[in-house]
Image: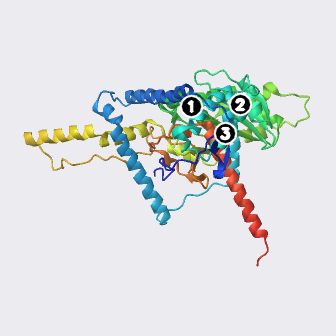
């Protein structure tokens, strides 16, 4: 299974007028926002370019590919990129046509309750970046200006709204990470925060959401895209009854020792509340593996929970203490991941469908990034590169001259576009749990959500938006728009049902 038709990368430009931009529904609105200077935008874009170069070099080393070899040169050939990009578009068009003709089943739609929970979780994931969100606010100008304005022309107002409280202005400039959480989540109570990032120990915080009746653990993702991409391409390690990303496994175990005791105590202090974990990018991956550990019967997990209750228990409190109920609540924890990397084996992902929900936006590269997926893309690029074809043709000519020619034609095209893979291999990684794909981000009718099989994200989609779709604020904006559209549709249906029949 592969990713199907998504948004058109060559969509027409949105209408623009002097001093105005296009917002939701094509309406114009005054644009009095601070515009980033050209150097700021170029610096931000260079961060993405540097990330691509960084991860490419590391992956080539892992795959034993020299940058000066035929494979290395072919993989960076712009002609090969264009050919593979066109093949991917043709494949998506074929899938779209098959759906329209009912040759393949239409994907299932998630229920509105799940989408609302994902939206709320995405807010906690954004807040986990603390004051770094102000840098993302500067990056949002790339989305709203120039070439990238077309890709998100119907989401720019929502991106602006989600960032407005923490934009760097004279009257709104949070001085520390905790302030950002209080600004973005005014109805939540922050219980504990740890902003000291160490090796295999990402920053995180614990909060209580009285509206949703949640005790929340939000894990921060890596802010710099170069680190995020590198984190997504690491060795696998044995985990529970499958395989998982080695570095994030270590981080999940550290979370068990450091944060589970505090979470168990918070559950005791808030009886009847659910335990929810979340995070964006690497943070989402760590949260997912941590939740898998909570659902296991590992004795160390139970000991960590009991330790927190022992240290924080107040015998003078009027709260009823029920150890069994608290431990059961821990084992029923749910996780909502935002842009989690492909970090678990397929069997682990399928087993976690009942308690882990992963959101993947558009053509976000990080959820599709794994060693196997990158190798598959490199193979496609090498097969499409003119240099590789020329070398193969020369080899064939040499074989003919030497009398060792095979029966294959000189025109043979190495088109390894899609290959069968061993799903039980330790290196075959997929996103965790039930996966919800957020698509058609710039459609006039609004974005949509679909439930997809985890293996639908084993092909890296070449697109100008493959990095921009990873922004945490884009996820929040898309989910907000989908929930708004669903609410409007439900209201319309209710009015039609209650209207008298003529």
Around disc 2, counting alpha carbons within 10 Å, would you say few (fewer than 14), some (14 to 19), or many (20 or more)?
Answer: many
Of the two numbered discs 3 and 1 on the same chain, state the one appearing first in sequence.
Answer: 3
Identify the residue at horizontal 26%, vertical 48% (top origin): 413
Of the two numbered discs 1 and 2 on the same chain, state the one appearing first in sequence.
Answer: 2
Horizontal and vertical percent position of residue 389: 24, 41
Residue 468: quadrant of the picture: top right
Considering depth in this image, is 298 or 428 the residue closer to the camera?
428
Of the two numbered discs 2 and 3 on the same chain, state the one appearing first in sequence.
Answer: 3
Query: What whole-number distance in Å separates the C-alpha atoms at marks 1 and 2?
Result: 32 Å
Element on which disc 1 rests: helix
**Label of residue 249 in the image:** 1
Horizontal and vertical percent position of residue 31: 67, 39
Query: What whole-number distance in Å separates the C-alpha atoms at marks 3 and 1?
Result: 45 Å
Horizontal and vertical percent position of residue 174: 74, 25
**Label of residue 31 in the image:** 3
Considering depth in this image, is 477 or 415 the residue closer to the camera?
477
Evaluate whether residue 306 shows in this view: no
Residue under numbered circle 2? 166
């Amino acid at each position: 299974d592969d990713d199907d038709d998504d948004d058109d990368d060559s969509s027409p430009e949105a209408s623009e007028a002097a001093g105005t931009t296009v917002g939701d529904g094509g309406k114009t609105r005054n644009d009095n926002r601070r515009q980033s200077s050209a150097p700021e935008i170029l610096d931000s874009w260079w961060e993405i370019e540097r990330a691509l170069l960084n991860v490419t070099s590391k992956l080539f080393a892992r795959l034993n590919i020299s940058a000066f070899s035929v494979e290395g040169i072919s993989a960076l050939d712009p002609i090969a990129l264009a050919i593979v990009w066109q093949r991917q578009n043709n494949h998506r068009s074929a899938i779209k046509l098959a759906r329209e003709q009912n040759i393949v089943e239409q994907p299932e739609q998630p229920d509105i309750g799940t989408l609302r929970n994902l939206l709320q979780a995405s807010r906690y994931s954004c807040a986990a970046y603390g004051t770094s969100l102000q840098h993302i606010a500067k990056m949002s100008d790339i989305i709203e200006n120039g070439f990238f304005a077309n890709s998100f022309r119907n989401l720019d107002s929502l991106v602006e709204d989600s960032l407005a409280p923490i934009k760097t202005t004279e009257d709104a400039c949070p001085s520390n990470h905790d302030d950002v959480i209080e600004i973005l989540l005014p109805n939540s109570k922050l219980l504990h925060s740890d902003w000291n990032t160490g090796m295999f120990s990402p920053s995180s915080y614990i909060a209580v959401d009285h509206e949703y009746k949640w005790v929340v653990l939000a894990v921060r993702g890596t802010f710099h895209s170069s680190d995020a991409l590198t984190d997504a391409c690491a060795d696998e390690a044995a985990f529970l009854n499958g395989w998982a990303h080695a570095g994030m496994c270590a981080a999940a175990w550290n979370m068990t020792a450091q944060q589970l005791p505090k979470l168990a105590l918070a559950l005791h202090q808030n009886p009847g509340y659910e335990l929810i974990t979340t995070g964006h990018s690497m943070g989402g991956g760590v949260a997912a593996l941590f939740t898998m550990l909570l659902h296991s019967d590992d004795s160390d997990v139970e000991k960590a929970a009991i330790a927190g209750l022992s240290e924080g228990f107040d015998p003078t409190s009027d709260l009823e203490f029920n150890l069994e109920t608290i431990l059961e609540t821990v084992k029923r924890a749910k996780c909502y991941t935002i842009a989690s990397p492909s970090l678990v084996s397929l069997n682990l992902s399928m087993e976690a469908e009942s308690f882990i929900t992963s959101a993947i936006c558009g053509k976000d590269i990080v959820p599709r990034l794994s060693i196997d997926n990158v190798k598959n893309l490199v193979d496609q690029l090498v097969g499409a590169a003119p240099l590789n074809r020329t070398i193969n043709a020369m080899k064939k000519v040499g074989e003919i001259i030497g009398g060792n020619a095979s029966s294959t034609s000189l025109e043979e095209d190495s088109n390894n576009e899609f290959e069968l893979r061993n799903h039980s291999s330790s290196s075959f990684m997929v996103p965790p749990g039930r996966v919800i794909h957020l698509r058609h981000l710039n459609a006039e009718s609004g974005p949509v959500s679909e439930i997809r099989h985890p293996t639908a994200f084993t092909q890296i989609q070449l697109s100008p938006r493959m990095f921009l779709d990873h922004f945490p604020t884009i996820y929040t904006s898309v989910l907000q728009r989908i929930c708004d559209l669903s609410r409007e549709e439900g209201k319309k249906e209710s009015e039609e049902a209650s209207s008298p029949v003529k």
